[in-house]
Image: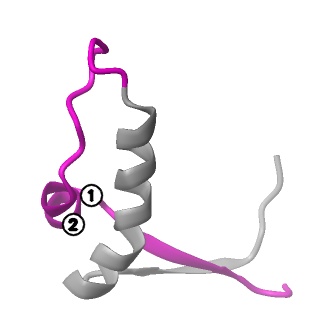
Amino acid sequence: MADLPASATVIVEPAQRRRILAALVEEFNRRHDPDGPWPLAVLDEWVAHSPLARVTFSDG
């Protein structure tokens, strides 16, 4: 484990969240087993309720 200098910015703009999360939701649903324990992901729900932040690492 290492401590790395970084800063984080919470992403709150819905259009930006949608752009980022769309690929994740698509991949999650592509791998989804219809008989598995997880329901299909709904992009609008992820945009509304998923925490999302951009982490930027500095040179230190």
- How many C-alpha atoms fall within 10 Å of the one at disc 2: few (<14), some, or many (≥20)? many
Q: Label for residue 1?
A: none
Give left or right: position of 31 versus 50.
Answer: right
The Cα atoms of the two marked residues, 2 and 1, are separated by 6 Å
Give left or right: position of 16 versus 41.
Answer: right
Residue at point 20%, 82% (across, down)? 14
Q: Is residue 13 visible?
A: no
Say whether residue 52 is magenta: yes
Q: Name the residue under label 1.
A: 50
Q: Mark 2 points at which residue?
A: 47
Q: In the image, which residues are magenta?
A: 33-60
Q: In the rendered image of this protein, does residue 36 appear above or below residue 38?
A: above
Position in image of residue 9 (x %, y %): 45, 83
Number of numbered discs: 2
- Looking at this view, is 51 or 18 the one in front? 18
The answer to whether the residue labelled 2 contacts the one labelled 1, judged by CB atoms less than 8 Å apart, is: yes
Amino acid tagged 1: Ser
Position in image of residue 29 (x %, y %): 35, 41
